[in-house]
Image (cartoon, rainbow, N blue to C red):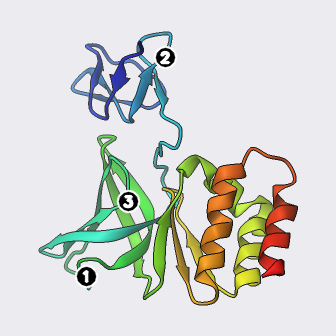
Amino acid sequence: MQEVIYPGDLLSETPIRAPNSYIENGKTYSMVLGFKDSSGTGIIPFEGGWTPKVEETVIGVISSERNNVYEVDLGSHYRSLIIGGKYERFSFRLGDIVEATVKDIEDGRTIILSYPKALQGGTVISIKPSKIPRLIGKNNTMINQISQGTSSKISVGMNGMVWIKDGNIALATAAILRIEEEAHVSGLTGRIKEMVEKR
């Protein structure tokens, strides 16, 4: 049985450059939840695991605030922060849905977010981050098709969270969940188009 590895677990007592890992104090640790690969030092993330990248757009929920530092729940194992300062102050409330950009990843464990904006109203659903590229589609074709077909405003976070507002939210949600389910099946774009046009 393969050993489950959690974010922060020690992989090696020496610094090793391996995918999905980070180095701290001369030792190598896991960045993600997954299994050890055949080398014993790399990590194979569980399907749907999200590894943040600088400049990615994410969506999350404000979970705490202290001294103009907000913690954001991104539905991942990473700690995520919006940090205000003397010249940049933010005003969010607990439970607010926000869209932001990954500015930095400190020690492979803490995400610093920039350019946050509140997404007023609407609802948030979560799908596997690995299915997000299929949801967006080439040149945004898939997500635009759903948005136009349902008259909904939709914002997609690379962390797997999707915000939907106005229009036929139920139909937009059903279409997005169908994409998650059938992402590997050919002809999906046509089926989704028929789905949103038929209703």
Q: Decide which of tag 2 and tag 1 comes sooner along the chain.
A: 2
Q: What is the quadrant of residue 68 in the picture?
A: bottom left
Point out the image quarter for the N terminus.
top left
Q: Please say if the residues under marks 3 and 1 sit with CB atoms less than 8 Å apart.
A: no
Residue 13 drawn at (x, y percent): 25, 13
Q: Which residue is mark 2?
A: 37
Number of numbered callouts drawn: 3
Q: Tag 2, which secondary structure?
A: loop
Q: Residue sitting at 32 percent across and 49 percent down? A: 78
Q: Nearer the viewer, mark 3 or mark 1?
A: 3
Residue 185 drawn at (x, y percent): 79, 46
Residue type at the position of mark 2: Asp
Q: Residue furthest top?
A: 39
Point out the image quarter for the C terminus.
bottom right
Q: Is residue 197 left or right of residue 37?
A: right
Q: Is residue 97 above or below residue 60?
A: below
Q: Which residue is mark 1?
A: 87
Residue type at the position of mark 1: Tyr
Q: Is residue 53 above or below residue 33?
A: below
Q: Tag 3, which secondary structure?
A: loop
Q: Residue sitting at 46 percent across and 78 percent down? A: 123
Q: Nearer the viewer, residue 156 or 4?
A: 4
Residue 132 drawn at (x, y percent): 61, 55
Q: Is residue 36 left or right of residue 10?
A: right
Q: Gap in Å between the C-alphas at discs 3 and 2?
A: 26 Å
Q: Decide which of tag 3 and tag 1 comes sooner along the chain.
A: 3
Q: Is residue 51 above or below residue 101?
A: above
Residue 34 drawn at (x, y percent): 42, 29
Q: Tag 1, which secondary structure?
A: loop
Q: Gap in Å between the C-alphas at discs 2 and 1?
A: 46 Å
Residue type at the position of mark 3: Leu
